[in-house]
């Protein structure tokens, strides 16, 4: 068969997945010559065979290379250019993993309805990704409150920092900020796993996990305070000061930093988010710190006497 016809057939086959496929042009090409239809059908059948044998092909590709043999007397150069193009087109046609779906917020929160009936309220300056388009396999950077209806046939899995949270129905809040991850349960229970945990941790209503640089702390928390940021309030129980400052930056938009010497001081209480540096100023007043303003930001330090 004419090499140019085979190559063109391969091009038409590869183009069929494109949004801008020229279906009218394709039909005209098929009808112009019976050899066009024959070439296209041959490539389509070859594609079907490769897809059917995909698992075997992938296994062979992953296998160690065989010992080197003497070169064969024939060379790839004898393979017709059209046939090579057809083979390449078939490889392109192999099923690919679906693309990630990402949601990202700026200065305001956003509620996302997932396809299984769950919802995620994404805090300001946060990002949630459905890996390979699977909305039961999520990855979070930032903060989100999840409301997951109970379904025994489905498990929602969320990667947050070095932790993985699994759930079949509950309400909970996750916050990831660099090496720090917080997980708190308002209702139901979830399972938390991580490389450094010997066994999964089960969190039930009113329990929270704080992970920092490899250490894990479990605490009790008022269930009604979980996700309180959605109502304009930040509630803490024995939280590190650096973490509180990070939250103020996220929700109030004013960069709040902490002197490293006091970053691990603990804070329990509630702060109104407010605007600008209001929350940082209130925090400094409550725990007796100095709030040093610089531009639109603030740095928390010990008071100098």
Image: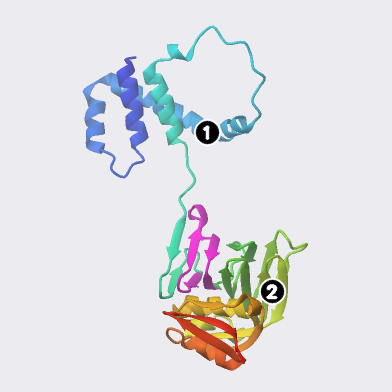
Mark yes or no: residue 272 visible. no
Q: At 69% across and 74% down in the image, what residue appears?
A: 203
Return the residue nearer the eye: 19 or 65.
Answer: 65
Quadrant of the rendering where the C terminus is positioned: bottom right
- Separation of marks 2 and 1 at Cα, in angstroms: 44 Å
Name the spot of residue 78 as percent of width and height, x first: 44, 11
Q: Is residue 264 above or below residue 87?
A: below
- Residue 107 drawn in magenta: no
Q: Main secondary structure of the magenta part?
A: strand
Q: Image quarter for residue 31?
A: top left
Which secondary structure, mark 2?
strand
Return the residue at label 1. 52
Q: At 36% across and 32% down in the image, what residue appears?
A: 13
Compared across the picture, whether 81 is left or right of 158 comes to: left
Mark yes or no: residue 236 visible. yes
Q: Image quarter for residue 36?
A: top left
- The circle on residue 203 is 2
Name the spot of residue 161 as percent of width and height, x first: 60, 63
Q: Residues within 10 Å of mark 2 (few under 14, many from 20)?
A: many
Q: Is residue 182 above or below residue 275?
A: above
Residue extending farthest to the top is: 73
Quadrant of the rendering where the N terminus is positioned: top left
Q: Earlier in the sequence, mark 2 or mark 1?
A: 1
Return the residue nearer the eye: 113 or 230.
Answer: 230
- Residue 144 drawn in magenta: yes
Return the residue nearer the eye: 172 or 67.
Answer: 67
Residue extending farthest to the front is: 305
Q: At 21% across and 23% down in the image, what residue appears?
A: 32
Q: Image quarter for residue 85?
A: top left
Mark 1 and mark 2 in contact (Cβ < 8 Å)?
Answer: no
Which secondary structure, mark 1?
helix
Q: Over which residues does the magenta segment extend?
A: 119-146
């Amino acid at each position: 068969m004419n090499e140019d016809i085979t190559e063109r057939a391969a091009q038409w086959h590869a183009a069929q997945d494109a949004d801008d496929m020229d279906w009218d042009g394709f039909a005209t090409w098929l009808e112009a010559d019976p050899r066009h239809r024959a070439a296209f059908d041959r490539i389509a059948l070859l594609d079907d065979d490769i897809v059917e044998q995909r698992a075997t092909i992938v296994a062979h590709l992953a296998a160690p290379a065989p010992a080197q043999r003497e070169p064969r007397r024939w060379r790839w150069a004898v393979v017709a250019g059209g046939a090579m193009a057809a083979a390449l087109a078939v490889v392109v046609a192999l099923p690919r993993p679906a693309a990630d779906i990402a949601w990202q917020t700026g200065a305001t929160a956003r509620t996302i309805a997932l396809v299984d009936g769950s919802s995620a309220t994404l805090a300001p300056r946060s990002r949630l990704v459905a890996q390979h388009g699977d909305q039961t396999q999520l990855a979070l950077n930032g903060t989100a409150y999840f409301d997951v209806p109970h379904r025994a046939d489905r498990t929602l899995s969320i990667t947050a920092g070095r932790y993985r949270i699994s759930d079949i129905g509950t309400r909970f809040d996750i916050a990831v900020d660099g090496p720090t991850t917080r997980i708190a349960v308002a209702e139901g229970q979830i399972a938390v796993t991580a490389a450094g945990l010997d066994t999964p941790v089960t969190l039930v209503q009113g329990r929270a996990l704080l992970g920092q640089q490899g250490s894990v702390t479990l605490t009790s928390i008022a269930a009604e305070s979980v996700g309180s940021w959605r109502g304009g309030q930040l509630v803490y129980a024995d939280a590190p000061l650096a973490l509180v400052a990070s939250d103020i930056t996220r929700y109030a938009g004013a960069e709040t930093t902490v002197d490293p010497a006091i970053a691990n001081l603990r804070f329990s209480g509630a702060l109104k988010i407010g605007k600008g540096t209001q929350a940082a100023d209130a925090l400094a007043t409550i725990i007796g710190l100095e709030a040093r303003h610089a531009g639109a930001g603030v740095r928390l330090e010990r008071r100098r006497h």
